[in-house]
Image (cartoon, rainbow, N blue to C red):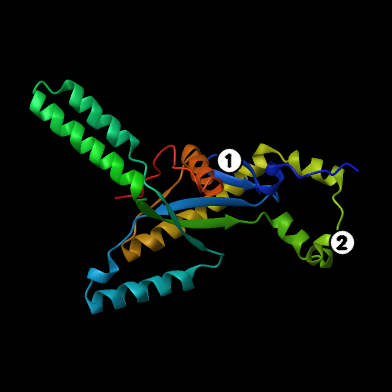
Amino acid sequence: MATDFANSQTLVEIADIRNNTVILKDGTLRKVLIVGGVNFSLKSQQEQDLITGAYQNFLNSLDFPFQTIIHSRKINIQKYLDDLEKRRVEEPSPLLQNQIAEYREFVHQFIQENAIMEKTFLAVVPWYPPHLVAQTKSTLSFLPFMKKKDAAEEAKRKEASLADIDRDISQLDQRVERTVEGLFSIGLEAVVLNDEQLVELFYNFYNPGTVERQEVSAPK
């Protein structure tokens, strides 16, 4: 008896990434912001209270869902090692060449034996197109195991015009602006990830055992 195994792509909820936006298979949209940190422990008690109060006010001011994610990953130092090797080759002094080579080997060996992790702080802002919100209010939507996939309905969803998507992204951008302004009032700088950075981010999410191919840097 043949058994059909699900394709790995069916387990990923992302349908497309474009215009700095994640488009999910259910038609909803997400913008992902990378947020710079603040050394909260070094602040005075008064400053900590002000930051906490400002963050509470920011959350209370939002009329839409808001998700925060802390993503830990291994630091990619290959570019740093390559730069050291380039520096060694260009160095005219044999003594300095040896010192650079020894230092490079020390760093390489240290990273091999000790995984150095970096934390990235992300904020996710969603947008639910009105026609999808109406659909999710049906009783059947709460019983997904009773709802069969309609091929025609699925095809109709995929044929949604670019104009509709652009309109939804425009609505989402307004939410993002409010979020960026709210975080900035707390002293946190937030930047929207572009398409390339989003691809890299989700590659890291779905391949946790690998080191990222490219840095996704937080705002300074």
Work out whether mark 2 precedes mark 1 in sequence or the reverse, and give the earlier one. 1
- Badge 2 amino acid: Met
Query: On screen, 131 above or below 95?
Result: below
Rendered residue at 86%/58% (across/down) = 147
Rendered residue at 40%/44% (across/down) = 216
Q: Is 197 displayed left or right of 100 in the figure?
A: right
Location of residue 51 (image quadrant): bottom left
Name the secondary structure under disc 1. Answer: strand
Query: On screen, 39 above or below 75?
Result: below
Residue 17 is tagged as 1
Rendered residue at 41%/38% (across/down) = 214
Kindly report which numbered mark, 2 or 1, lies closer to the viewer in this rendering: 2
Q: Is 91 displayed left or right of 185 in the figure?
A: left
Q: Is 103 displayed left or right of 61 in the figure?
A: left
Q: Position of residue 190 (x, y in %)?
A: 39, 54
Q: Position of residue 218 (x, y in %)?
A: 36, 50
User: Within 10 Å of the Cα at label 1, are there few (<14), some (14-19), or many (20+) other Cα atoms?
Assistant: some
- Badge 1 amino acid: Ile
Query: On screen, 97 above or below 141?
Result: above
Which residue bears the numbered disc 2? 146
Residue 204 is tagged as none
**Front residue (pair 8, 129):** 8
**Front residue (pair 203, 56):** 203
Name the secondary structure under disc 2. Answer: helix
- The quarter of the image holding the N terminus is top right
Q: Position of residue 22 (x, y in %)?
A: 58, 46
Q: Is 135 displayed left or right of 23 in the figure?
A: right
User: Within 10 Å of the Cα at label 2, are there few (<14), some (14-19), or many (20+) other Cα atoms?
Assistant: few
**Front residue (pair 164, 119):** 119
